[in-house]
Amino acid sequence: MKEYLLLFRNASAADGYMATAQDMATDMPLWQSWIGNIAMQGKLVTTAPIEYHSTVVTNTTVEVGPYKEANTVLVSGFLICKSDNVEEVQQWSKGCPILKYPNSSVEIRTLVPFPLG
């Protein structure tokens, strides 16, 4: 069974997430149900939202503020799960609550274990 990283991307406002506190409260049961479905199958490894504020370090600079793509889309959370195939993970991703927001997406990346020894 492979592990997969799901990156939740969403549009942001100028200095915070686009979703309001009310949006988040309304969406919480949707997230709990969606994540719970993966967990009940024994395939959830971990998940968490990501705080808006960050530091971006390059080889020449340290900048305060999240890395935003050109259209103000940024990573707002993640989930690590396990599955025998990426098609199952794609099906789960189609039901992700983040997709109700404009410019949102779920990026699926296969995790590669470090070789031992």
Image: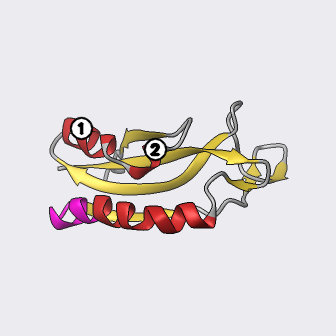
Residue occupying image coordinates x 36% and y 60% = 30
Q: From the viewer's side, name the closer residue of 70 and 21.
A: 21
Q: In the rendered structure, which amino acid carries the disc numbered 1?
A: Val
Q: From the viewer's side, name the closer residue of 43 and 60.
A: 43
Q: Position of residue 79 (x, y in %)?
A: 39, 56
Please state the extent of the stretch shown in magenta in the rendering.
36-43
Q: Label 2: few (<14), some or many (≥20) within 10 Å?
A: few
In the rendered image, is residue 81 in sight? yes
Residue wearing tag 1: 86
> Real-space Cα distance between discs 2 and 1?
22 Å
Q: Look at the numbered disc 2 and give the secondary structure of its residue.
A: helix
Residue occupying image coordinates x 34% and y 67% = 32
Q: In the rendered structure, which amino acid carries the disc numbered 2?
A: Lys
Q: Tell me which secondary structure the magenta stretch mostly adopts.
A: helix
Residue 93 vs 69, above or below: the answer is below
N-terminal label among 2 and 1? 1
Residue 28 vs 12, above or below: the answer is below
Q: Position of residue 2 (x, y in %)?
A: 23, 48
Q: Position of residue 92 (x, y in %)?
A: 26, 46
In this rendering, would 15 be left or right of 107?
Answer: right
The C terminus: image quadrant: bottom left
Residue wearing tag 2: 100
Q: Is residue 37 magenta?
A: yes
Q: Is residue 80 magenta?
A: no
Q: Position of residue 55 (x, y in %)?
A: 75, 57
